[in-house]
Image: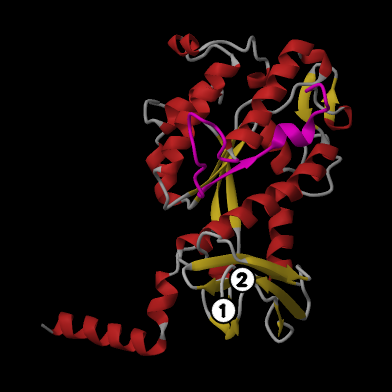
């Protein structure tokens, strides 16, 4: 009885202080990057000694720019992933729980964000292939790789309590591949980013909100699918050099954590699906006064709310409009700390939401 009374007292105090709301917030700001040598070079410092930054450096910069501290700060560790390779066939086994070498549930339990990739040999694609290729999961065809990705993404989709980033292939330098392999790799990675991730793949369908495709191949390759020469370690060595680290590390941090924090807002109910309401938010990023131009899809009351990154409502107003009348509103963010804010515009059953960056 005493124990129950003590727990009840703690709950009442927490409720009065609003602390229970803090504990209910689900953060997607820390994780792990599972990689081999290419990922290690990008994590930095690059082994060639010529990189000027690292992913940890960029995470520190990200936290400073956005004013993130404590449990709001982003963080990521890294691990040389244990299998002898991390081809897409190996990742497929890992995500479907068929691999004896490592346990997916361990990572899902201990990390909110999981970043995975393949080795650059996955860009040595043999053929376009056919659906029957799945009889040999290790065969390097575009059809097999699409099959692997769809299965991997399906597992990711079924774990909404985690956020995932998956890299497209690492391109090979011109002396380590041929024109056919390079173009097939380019076509596969373009499908992954422009079709699958856009929700346009007729087999997979809509893309899960808790997954982000980091297009490493598109960033690091030329129009023919070869690794860009300025990022090559040397002839016959496709590992990214220091310039590659400097080029990719900031994009890795900004893209992946922007996406995970956006998902965090969705997961916690701060952002809902967009609607026919048309909203322009400018300037964005902003230092002081942010403006909203709103063109509602119907007459009636328009509600505009702004939230901090942890869900605290800092602005709430409403306007009544007739027909498609345009509304222009301004809100001064200068008295608030730097970081990410979310806005939500509601009109009847329609909702439009988005992100504001306060610099």
Q: 122 or 316, which lies in front?
A: 316
Residue 9 tag number: none
User: Which residue occupies the extreme front position in the image?
Assistant: 323
Percent from the top left, x then y, of residue 51?
83, 43
216 horizontally vs 223: left or right: left
- Disc 2 + disc 1, Cβ < 8 Å: yes
Percent from the top left, x then y, of residue 279?
67, 68
Quarter of the image that includes the N terminus: bottom left
Chief secondary structure of the magenta portion: loop
Residue shown at 68% from the left, 65% from the top: 63
Percent from the top left, x then y, of residue 55?
70, 49
Q: Is residue 147 magenta?
A: no
Picture layout, residue 136 above or below residue 21:
above
Residue shown at 64% from the left, 36% from the top: 193
Element at label 1: strand
Percent from the top left, x then y, of residue 110?
43, 50
Residue topped by disc 1: 302
Residues drawn in magenta: 198-225
Residue topped by disc 2: 296
Element at label 2: loop
Q: 300 or 337, which lies in front?
A: 300
Crowdedness near tag 2: few (<14), some (14–19) or many (≥20) residues, C-alpha within 10 Å: many
Residue shown at 77% from the left, 73% from the top: 286
């Amino acid at each position: 009885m005493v124990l129950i009374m003590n727990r009840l007292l703690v709950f009442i105090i927490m409720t009065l202080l609003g602390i229970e709301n803090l504990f209910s917030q689900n953060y997607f700001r820390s994780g792990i990057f599972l990689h081999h040598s290419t990922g290690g070079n990008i994590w930095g410092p690059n082994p060639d000694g010529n990189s000027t930054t690292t992913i940890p450096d960029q995470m520190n910069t990200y936290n400073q720019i956005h004013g993130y501290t404590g449990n709001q700060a982003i963080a990521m560790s890294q691990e040389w992933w244990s299998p002898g390779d991390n081809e897409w066939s190996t990742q497929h086994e890992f995500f479907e729980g068929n691999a004896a070498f490592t346990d997916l549930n361990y990572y899902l339990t201990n990390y909110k964000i999981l970043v995975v990739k393949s080795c650059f040999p996955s860009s040595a694609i043999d053929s376009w292939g056919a659906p029957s290729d799945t009889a040999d999961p290790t065969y390097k065809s575009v059809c097999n790789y699409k099959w692997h990705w769809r299965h991997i993404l399906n597992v990711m989709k079924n774990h909404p309590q985690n956020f995932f980033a998956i890299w497209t292939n690492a391109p090979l330098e011109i002396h380590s591949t041929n024109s056919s392999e390079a173009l097939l790799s380019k076509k596969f990675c373009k499908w992954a980013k422009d079709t699958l991730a856009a929700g346009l793949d007729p087999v997979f369908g809509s893309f899960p909100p808790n997954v982000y495709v980091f297009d490493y191949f598109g960033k690091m390759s030329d129009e023919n699918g070869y690794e860009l020469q300025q990022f090559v370690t040397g002839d016959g060595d496709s590992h990214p050099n220091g310039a590659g680290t400097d080029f990719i590390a900031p994009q890795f941090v900004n893209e992946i954590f922007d996406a995970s924090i956006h998902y965090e807002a969705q997961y916690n109910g701060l952002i809902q699906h967009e609607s026919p309401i048309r909203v322009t938010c400018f300037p964005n990023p902003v230092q002081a006064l942010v403006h909203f131009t709103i063109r509602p899809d119907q007459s009636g009351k328009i509600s505009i709310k702004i939230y901090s990154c942890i869900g605290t409502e800092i602005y709430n107003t409403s306007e009544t409009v007739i027909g498609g009348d345009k509304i222009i509103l301004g809100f001064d963010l200068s008295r608030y700390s730097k970081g990410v804010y979310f806005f939500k515009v509601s009109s009847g059953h329609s909702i439009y939401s988005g992100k504001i960056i306060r610099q």
